[in-house]
Amino acid sequence: MWGIIRQKVGSRCFSASILGQSLERIEQPLTVLARNFSSGGKDMNVRDALNSALDEEMSADPKVLLMGEEVGEYQGAYKISKGLLEKYGPERVLDTPITEAGFAGIGVGAAYYGLRPVVEFMTFNFSMQAIDHIINSAAKSNYMSAGQINVPIVFRGPNGAAAGVGAQHSQCYAAWFASCPGLKVLSPYSSEDARGLLKAAIRDPDPVVFLENELLYGESFPVSAEALDSSFCLPIGKAKIEREGKHVTITAFSKMVGYALQAAEILAKEGISAEVINLRSIRPLDRDTINASVRKTNRLVTLEEGFPQHGVGAEICTSVIEESFEYLDAPVERIAGADVPMPYAANLERMAVPQVDDIVRAAKRACYRAVPVAAVA
Amino acid sequence: MGSSKNLKRSSWISSSLLLDLRNPSLIHGVGRNPPAVLENLKTHSADCRFASTKAGDERDLRFDNDENQVLDFPGGRVMFTYQLKFISESPEKRADCFRVLDDNGQPIAGNYIEQVNEEVAVKMYGNMVTLQIMDTIFYEAQRQGRISFYLTSIGEEAINIASAAALTIDDLIFPQYREPGVLLWRGFSLQEFANQCFSNKADHGKGRQMPIHYGSNKLNYFTISSPIATQIPQAVGAAYSLKMDQKKACAVTYFGDGGTSEGDFHAALNFAAVMEAPVIFFCRNNGWAISTPTSEQFRSDGLVVRGPAYGIRSIRVDGNDALAVYCAVRAAREMAINEHRPILVEALTYRAGHHSTSDDSTKYRPVDEIEHWKTMRDPVSRFRKWVEGNGWWSEADESELRSNVRKKILDAIQAAEKAEKPPLADLFTDVYSDIPSNLREQERSLRETVQKHPQDYPPDVPV
């Protein structure tokens, strides 16, 4: 799966990678808004991006510590914390016993007193065993104590479906956590997102839930020199327009951003220019960017991997109806995972998560184009 | 080879038991006398060891001095036994309970009374009386409908005050909810207690929580939160933090007998032992979790025996004996800080009041039992006898203190009741460190609505 992000590097392309070559073959050039980065596009995978972000924040602030199962000696269940135990020692990289409730509670207690813990859940499915501490001890404490207790903690780990791991290892928790006031919920897509958002999360004085994706860990993205700097930080609550478009807005986060970009490519061949928004921040949701986009395109497709009812898309849809109803030319299309616990069999699993052709079909429906029964993609 | 114990292949040796039949001593005993384990079931510290099912690498077998087989497993070396014995589920003798004063306030033995001088003793007693009167009057206030809820600590005044007196202000307190005495000892005023119960403008909690959910950053007393036992692992985290800072202080967390059933209790104790965190786990075993007696809460010998299960040094103490609590917590604190280890203190006591104002405990326990503990086993009068016995307190002091405290509390309640409620802005602050734009918008919108419809807005809430 290719993450199709390219920085506009001026008239010359430096990258000689396969990615660069295959992109040059595509008819329409890809342009990205937001920022023009300086040249020198180094490639970095998301795993290394997260690792470097953790390393730099731990180096900059001695109060930051990492705790979770297998984060130390094993170098991290997904190798995100590789090398950190060796560099910072067992006092700051803690291998915990198997008790999510235990170490979430302990992390919150440490944060109460002034440390800045980064608590890793092996997957967010296991965060349910700790969710009382995340909600009742972390999220609500500042409010309940009237500002006396703040909790600068980060809960991070892979979220959502991986590949062939079944119902109890595949749920997306973005909607669950994003419904709770007191929490901030972030979900990166690219390596730049991963670096910038994790650093922002660690530096933030409030509790942050940081939803990664296992399948993205190995994916490489070009990263600018600015993003590689140790002071780099992305703002919480700002979405990124990954691809500008005119006809339909597609909102997505995490792995689905890549799918949306692929769908946009396909749609472009049919004359539909899709604007892809990488939410980056689920709570607070960047309602301004989403609404501004919909006011421009007049059509909206929300995309997520999680269950449809009460999901992220439902909130985005409502936000747009509340603020930009007159601008909508078509009903909002909501694409989400199937309303079933994730099946294991590969063919069933494929049908339970959104695929690129689902996105293309939905965008076309929103654009009132006839849709053949067989998928185009 | 050790002495061979006889083993009969009775029906209860199912295939799920792992026996290495190549072990000659076991085979030797088959078919003879009844298994030793049934006879020894009640023996204190009976042992059970199953031989390994593996082939048993001969090189791994070693022998100690007495030629008994020992083997290295993950976790260390263990000695084998050929007796099929189970560790009994209940000991022959329950763990001893430490006390300094008898039921009449007379010192029993030992030099522990020297730890508390006149000044500390009088302050302790004064606080115990204050706590008792404060509880009584606030409880009445709830009954009169002036506050919505209250929870007393009647019968646990010694636990509250004596444990607080044994700590320093730098020690971090993670309470459950029946420990306002610790806050009182540290200097929280009666007016501050009343303000929180009436949720007025002066409440440190800005009116966000129901009564008795006190908290004070200044006094290192973490704001009370209702879910049971969540404070236990938090205390461990804070203790770890203190250890990293190399502070000469510990974390102390309180919980009841019921709270020990929560998963958080297990995770916290286990973790604290592994992390070597300087934390005191103080269990107020008062016999009741609302209507659940301890016999329905657990089947162990109280909570003190659980400490060693996690590798934690533990003590059982008479919770109604102020001096015993004081000495035990002093010692625990020394060990926690100097040796970087958790300590478990189980204080046996009785919840002489109802669980809270939402409870009527006469429905599930006999009235005379409650009366007995309230009068004959009252920790306040017991300590009073000792303090008076030393010539440090008199009847005159008593009546003066009681009437002063009573008046102060009634004044505090009156003032708290009359005070303004927290302003509207306090609804929206502290959700995050900085107020987000959507909440600012909601506040603005709410103010607009209030201005448009002032008759629908309560008069005692400032806008």
Image: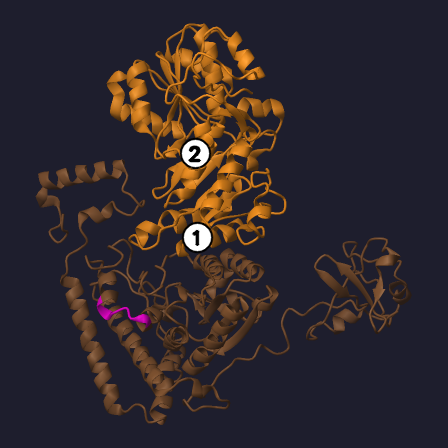
The dot on residue B217 is: none
**Label ID, residue A115:** 1
Query: Residue B127, position in %: x, y?
Result: 31, 77
Q: Is label 1 on the same chain as label 2?
A: yes
Q: Position of residue B400 (x, y in %)?
A: 21, 85
Residue type at mark 1: give it.
Leu
Closer-to-camera residue (A284/B147): A284
Up/down of A182 relative to A37, above or below: below
Residue name at image x 30 percent, y 81 percent: B126
Q: Indicate the chain on which mark 2 is placed.
A: A
Residue toward you, B29 or A27: A27
Q: Which residues are magenta?
A: B186-191
Residue drawn at the location 25% of the way across and 59% of the way down:
B204
Q: Nearer the viewer, residue A24 or B384?
A: A24
Alpha-carbon span between mark 1 and mark 2: 21 Å
Query: Which element type, helix, strand or loop, lies under badge 2?
Result: helix
The vertical placement of A68 against B143, above or below, is above
Badge 2 is on which residue? A196
Q: Give the color of chain A as drawn.
A: orange
In screen coordinates, is B17 left or right of A272? right
